[in-house]
């Protein structure tokens, strides 16, 4: 029997709230299902087109990451309030209707179309001290550069990354996590000066930067024995150098068709895209998202990051800079 029918048949003294509690969902969800069963449309008009598709991708990705345990309100807050609740409800209801609460939604994996479309970066903490910062080409998995410092303030992160991307070739997109070094005005201004699109990771979502995470795991395996026995920085650095050479030059990867990252990086054709047009379209769409769905003051920072991601999802597909392989790489994230 439909839930709204159950509500109409309540015994005296029962309330909608008590039924919702018994069934494990909110009162808002109860009324929404009731209206849906009656054929009544609820809520404001949902975003459609490319922006709507990008929002659906974001919602499904998070829903899968959280094993379907997050409802509308926490998802809405997670995305800084720039994705309407009506769109979140729509996606969650579709998943529930089609698959039930046990199965989880499938999210298509993607590959960037060519080397130099997108770079990413990540840190590795090492013994006896400090962190290693690496920059990776997302398509080829080629490690473009790495360095070690005891501390990485934004004043040192920014020129380190800038030197790599200017020397080896500017990407169209640059993926980074939400570390203060990357969110800083200095780092973001550097990307803007080269018209490189910033693509920040969602908070607490390492799979978004999965290629770098998997490379980090391999590196940790290389240096594990050295780190265990009173390591010196010189010994760890030597192992890091060996690991980088091995990953770049020697280790074929199934996801690259049995080729090495160095081979893909050096030989694969680059894509030709009007950088100015791509960046301008992304920037305009980013502003549109923030203006159309203005966030609360407390969610402004999260909203700005989400607007960047949504705009990047739209333009990367519009300009055909991603592909969807038949047998994509299975993501394995290091702990």
Image: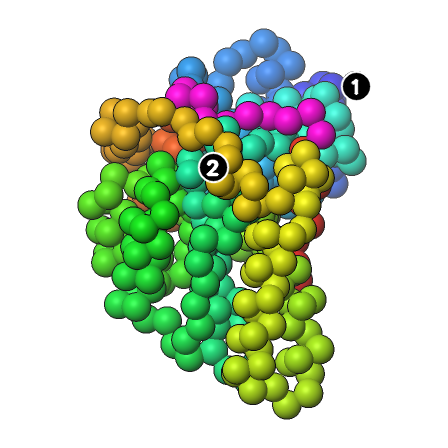
Q: What is the number of the mark on residue 115?
A: 2
Identify the colour scheme used: rainbow
Magenta region, residue range: 317-327
- For the question of whether residue 319 can be seen, the reply is yes
Where does the image place residue 64, in percent across and percent down from the top left? 65, 39
- Image point 42% across, 15% down: which residue? 49
Q: Is mark 1 on a helix, strand or loop?
A: loop
Separation of residues labelled 1 and 2 (CA atoms): 54 Å
Where does the image place residue 216, in percent across and percent down from the top left? 59, 60
Closest to the camera, between mark 1 and mark 2, is 2
Check the image and report above or below for 176 versus 29.
below
Considering depth in this image, is 141 or 78 the residue closer to the camera?
141
- Image quarter of residue 272: top left
- Image point 47% across, 78% down: which residue? 130
Dot 2 crowding, Cα within 10 Å, few <14, some 14–19, many 20+: many
Q: What is the number of the mark on residue 1?
A: 1
Dot 1 crowding, Cα within 10 Å, few <14, some 14–19, many 20+: few
Q: Name the chief secondary structure element in magenta.
A: loop
Q: Say whether residue 295 is left or right of residue 65.
A: left
- Image point 60% across, 16% down: which residue? 36
- Image quarter of residue 236: bottom right
Which quarter of the image is occupied by the C terminus?
bottom right
Check the image and report above or below for 215 versus 7.
below
Where does the image place residue 253, in percent across and percent down from the top left? 68, 43
């Amino acid at each position: 029997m439909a839930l709204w029918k159950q509500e109409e048949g309540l015994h005296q003294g029962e309330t909608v709230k008590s039924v919702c509690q018994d069934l494990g969902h909110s009162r808002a969800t109860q009324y929404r299902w009731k209206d849906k069963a009656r054929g009544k449309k609820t809520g404001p008009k949902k975003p459609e087109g490319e922006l709507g598709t990008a929002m659906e991708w974001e919602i499904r990705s998070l829903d899968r990451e959280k094993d379907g345990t997050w409802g509308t309100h926490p998802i809405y807050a997670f995305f800084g309030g720039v994705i309407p609740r009506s769109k979140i409800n729509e996606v969650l209801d579709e998943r529930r209707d089609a698959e039930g609460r046990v199965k989880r939604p499938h999210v298509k994996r993607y590959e960037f179309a060519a080397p130099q479309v997108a770079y990413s970066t990540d840190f590795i903490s090492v013994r006896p001290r400090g962190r290693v910062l690496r920059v990776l080409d997302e398509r080829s998995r080629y490690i473009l550069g790495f360095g070690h410092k005891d501390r990485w303030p934004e004043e040192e992160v920014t020129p380190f990354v800038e030197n790599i991307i200017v020397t080896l070739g500017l990407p169209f997109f640059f993926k980074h996590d939400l570390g203060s070094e990357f969110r800083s005005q200095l780092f973001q201004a550097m990307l803007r000066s080269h018209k490189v699109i910033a693509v920040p990771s969602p908070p607490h979502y390492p799979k978004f930067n999965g290629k770098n995470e998997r490379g980090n795991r391999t590196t940790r395996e290389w240096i594990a024995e050295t780190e265990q026995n009173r390591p010196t920085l010189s010994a760890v650095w030597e192992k890091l150098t060996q690991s980088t050479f091995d990953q770049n030059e020697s280790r074929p990867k199934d996801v690259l068709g049995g080729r090495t990252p160095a081979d893909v990086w050096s030989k694969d054709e680059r894509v030709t895209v009007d950088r100015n047009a791509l960046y301008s379209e992304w920037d305009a769409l980013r502003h549109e998202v923030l203006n159309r769905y203005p966030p609360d003051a407390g969610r402004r920072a999260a909203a700005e990051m989400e607007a960047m991601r949504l705009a990047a999802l739209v333009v990367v597909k519009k300009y055909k800079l991603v592909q969807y392989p038949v047998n994509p790489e299975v993501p394995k994230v290091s702990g």
